Image (tube, rainbow, N blue to C red):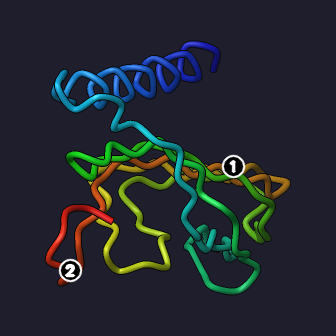
Amino acid sequence: MKSRYFHKVRVAILIVACLAMSTPSWAGSPIVKATFGVYLEGVDKHGCLTDCGGQCDPFCAILNTCTGGFVGSAKGCVANCSCRPECYLCVNFFQNCCINVAASVYTVTSKGSACYVAVGCVSCCGNSGGPA
């Protein structure tokens, strides 16, 4: 259990380091804090994600304004009718269609504490400028 937790922490640190290193040095400081809206879904009695029992929460991220890449997390409390800890990979809970998720982990404890960690890219969605 402990090693699995530290593995997730190491992966998150590696993702942040990769995001920081992918920034050109001439760009100054293109790393900013950003907040996006996510809807954390609940879990039904079979362990499947469902809109019932979910909630809207803020997703706090570090955003590279040059590349549009981001990494961040959201925490909340949702209904877990399976009464078992659940883990889901590669889900996209963003309410903005311009946010593309490359990888994510969503965990829900048996009591309903939820944690969503994601890495991806914000696209321009038809704007003539760069990433949003």
Q: Nearer the viewer, residue 132 or 82?
A: 132
Q: Secondary structure at mark 1?
A: loop
Task: For the residues labelled 2 and 1, say whether their Cβ atoms are less than 8 Å apart.
Answer: no
User: Which residue is at 29% across, 31% downward?
Assistant: 19
Residue at image coords 31%, 75%: 98
At horizontal 76% and vertical 80% (from top left) the residue drawn is: 53
Q: Position of residue 17 (x, y in %)?
A: 34, 20
Mark 2 burial class by Cα count in 10 Å: few <14, some 14-19, many 20+: few
Q: Residue furthest right?
A: 111
Q: Position of residue 123 (x, y in %)?
A: 24, 67
Picture quarter containing residue 121?
bottom left
Identify which amino acid the numbered label 2 is placed on: Asn
> In the image, 67: left or right of 71?
left
Q: How many marks?
A: 2
Could you say which disc has been placed on residue 128 in the image? none
- Residue pictured at 66% horizontal, 71% vertical: 43
Quarter of the image with the C terminus in it: bottom left
Q: Nearer the viewer, residue 106 or 20?
A: 20
54 in relation to 84, above or below: below
Question: Image height check: is 123 above or below 106?
Answer: below
* Mark 1 lies on residue: 85
* Mark 2 residue element: loop
Q: Which residue is mark 2?
A: 127
Q: If you read the primary sequence from the N terminus, does the residue marked by circle 2 or circle 1 appear first?
A: 1
Q: Examine the image and state in which quarter residue 36 appears.
A: bottom right
On the rendered image, what quadrant is the N terminus found in?
A: top right
**Picture coordinates of residue 3, whole percent (x, y):** 55, 13
Is 112 left or right of 125, judged from the image as shown? right
Q: Position of residue 55 (x, y in %)?
A: 73, 75
87, 34: nearer the viewer: 34
The Cα atoms of the two marked residues, 2 and 1, are separated by 41 Å
